């Protein structure tokens, strides 16, 4: 179903690795809603080749490699995108996360600090880098919209989420801080969407992910929100229907974040 909510808009989508990726689902929905897009991912992820299928499904969208921790790559990405669009950009999806300590099996209390600083750079400060690049090139149109993906471990403890909890807290802080400056300069809005656990490559990397997902499902009045619903929510945030929403962390989690307990969980505890 298309309402052409993004008709005439141009956007860059970071982080589509495979068809389960939140970015992949969002790219398809943005295209369906009338947007033109450029796809980007780290050069190592592009080598998998999967993204070419998505590019084709999105009207032969250009695919431009960029490691999000490299300022030259980001500058090239924004310059090439503006050249392709023949003008400035209306929206950006930052759908990027990677934890070196999780990947290498280090628990939170044994953290390797070099890996941790890379994690924070890839997963959180990268949003600053993206916004800074757009700011320096004056690449975003007035009333543009930038969305990054977060998780409720930024506010509450989920032990196996490890250092990514700190990364998400930093990501949400950058959202507020840069959101202030970009709002004043260009009326650009910056928000995070705090998504339910979702079965993707990054999601499944968290220890005990199945238990984690089932628990969230039982604790959410509406159940877990899936990737396609997350994509729909991102479309609304890129559209002109949400022009005064900025600097927010927006829960997209079926009500999980504000539920103390559910009848389902009480019944399980009584067994
Ligand atoms: N899956 C979940 O349960 C869940 C829940 C809440 C939030 N999120 C967040 O959603 C976002 C997208 O993750 P996903 O679940 O779709 O998983 P995913 O693995 O499909 O996407 C993560 C992406 O980050 C990219 N990436 C990693 N390092 C990079 C670098 N240096 N430069 C550029 N790109 C890089 C990867 O190539 C990949 O495309 C992440 O921020 C994640 O933390 C996921």
Image (tube, rainbow, N blue to C red):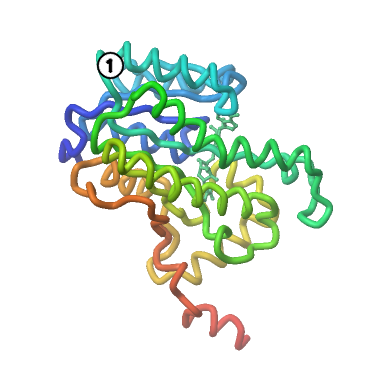
Query: Is residue 61 visible in this depiction of the protein?
Result: yes
Give 266 or 122, whichever is nearer the viewer. 122
User: The N terminus lies in which quarter of the figure?
Assistant: top left
Q: Is residue 49 visible?
A: no
Q: Is 240 placed above or below 56 here?
A: below
Spot occupied by residue 116 in the image (x, y as percentages of width and height):
72, 42
Q: Is residue 155 left or right of residue 235?
A: right
Residue depicted at 43% across the width and 50% down the height: 176
Give percent across and percent down for residue 30.
29, 34
**Between 112 and 270, the one nearer to me in the picture:** 112
Q: Judge the density around disc 1: few (<14), some (14-19), many (≥20) Cα neighbours within 10 Å.
A: some
Label 1: which residue? 85
Task: Say left or right for 166 vs 220.
Answer: right
Work out which quarter of the rendered image holds the C terminus and state it.
bottom right
The residue shown at (53%, 20%) is: 66
As drawn, 161 above or below 128: below
> Where does the image place residue 159, in percent across and percent down from the top left?
69, 62
Q: Secondary structure at mark 1?
A: helix
């Amino acid at each position: 179903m298309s309402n052409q909510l993004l008709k005439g808009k141009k956007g860059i989508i970071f982080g589509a690795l495979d068809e389960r990726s939140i970015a992949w689902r969002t790219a398809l929905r943005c295209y369906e809603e009338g947007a033109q897009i450029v796809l980007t991912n780290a050069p190592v992820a592009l080598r998998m080749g999967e993204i070419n299928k998505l590019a084709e499904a999105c009207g032969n969208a250009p695919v431009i490699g960029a490691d999000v921790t490299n300022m030259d790559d980001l500058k090239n990405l924004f310059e090439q995108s503006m050249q392709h669009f023949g003008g400035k950009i209306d929206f950006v999806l930052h759908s990027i996360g990677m934890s070196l300590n999780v990947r290498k099996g280090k628990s939170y209390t044994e953290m390797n600090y070099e890996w941790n600083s890379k994690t924070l750079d890839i997963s959180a400060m990268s949003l600053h880098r993206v916004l800074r690049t757009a700011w320096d090139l004056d690449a975003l149109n007035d009333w543009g919209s930038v969305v990054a993906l977060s998780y409720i471990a930024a506010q509450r403890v989920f032990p196996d989420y490890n250092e990514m909890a700190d990364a998400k807290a930093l990501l949400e802080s950058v959202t507020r801080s840069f959101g202030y400056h970009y709002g004043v300069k260009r009326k650009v809005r910056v928000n995070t969407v705090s998504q339910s656990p979702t079965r993707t490559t990054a999601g499944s990397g968290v220890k005990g992910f199945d238990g984690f997902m089932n628990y969230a499902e039982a604790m959410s009045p509406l159940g877990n929100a899936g990737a396609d619903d997350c994509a729909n929510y991102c479309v609304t945030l890129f559209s002109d229907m949400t022009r005064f929403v900025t600097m927010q962390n927006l829960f997209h989690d079926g009500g999980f974040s504000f539920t103390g307990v559910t009848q389902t969980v009480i019944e399980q505890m009584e067994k």
